[in-house]
Amino acid sequence: TAMDLSEANLERIRQQDSRIHTLFADACEPGISDKKYDLIVALEVLEHIVNPRLAIGIWKSLLKPPQLRYFQKDPRHLL
């Protein structure tokens, strides 16, 4: 599943691999609380979120144990 607030980005993802489920949603309000994931990867996302702690908490709730996650942020931006 790929989540983004850019329909253009999601369309690009769908064109690259039609097997990827895309979701137009906000990281702090994904609307998918009934689904659990093995892994969440957020690359250079946190510095663009108003409340990154809220987003991380929501992402943690979407993970299956053992809660493997990887975040990367642009080092030029402070959280």
Image (cartoon, rainbow, N blue to C red):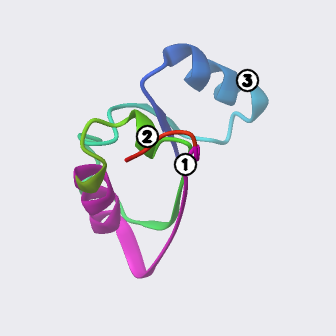
Q: As shown in the figure, which amino acid type bears the numbered disc 1?
A: Lys
Graded by Cα atoms within 10 Å as few (under 14), some (14 to 19) or many (20 or more), the crowding at tag 2 reads some
Segment tinted magenta in the rendering: 54-75
Residue at image point 42% right, 24% down: 5
Q: Position of residue 21 (x, y in %)?
A: 54, 40
* Earlier-in-chain disc, 1 versus 2: 2
Q: Kindly check if marks 3 and 1 are in contact, taking CB atoms under 8 A apart as contact.
A: no
Q: Which is more toward the observer, 30 or 27?
A: 27
* Earlier-in-chain disc, 3 versus 2: 3
State the mark number for residue 42.
Answer: none
Graded by Cα atoms within 10 Å as few (under 14), some (14 to 19) or many (20 or more), the crowding at tag 1 reads some
Q: As shown in the figure, which amino acid type bears the numbered disc 2?
A: Glu
State the mark number for residue 73.
Answer: 1
Q: Is residue 36 above or below residue 72?
A: below
Q: Kindly check if marks 1 and 2 are in contact, taking CB atoms under 8 A apart as contact.
A: yes
Residue at image point 25% right, 61% down: 57
| Residue 35 magenta-highlighted | no
As helix, strand or loop, the secondary structure at mark 1 comes to: loop
Q: Position of residue 18 (x, y in %)?
A: 69, 33
Image depth: mark 3 or mark 2 in front: 2
Q: Position of residue 78 (x, y in %)?
A: 42, 44
3 on left or right of 26: right
Q: Which residue is mark 2?
A: 47
Residue at image point 67% right, 29% down: 13
Graded by Cα atoms within 10 Å as few (under 14), some (14 to 19) or many (20 or more), the crowding at tag 3 reads few
Q: Kindly check if marks 3 and 2 are in contact, taking CB atoms under 8 A apart as contact.
A: no
8 on left or right of 54: right
Q: Which residue is mark 3?
A: 15
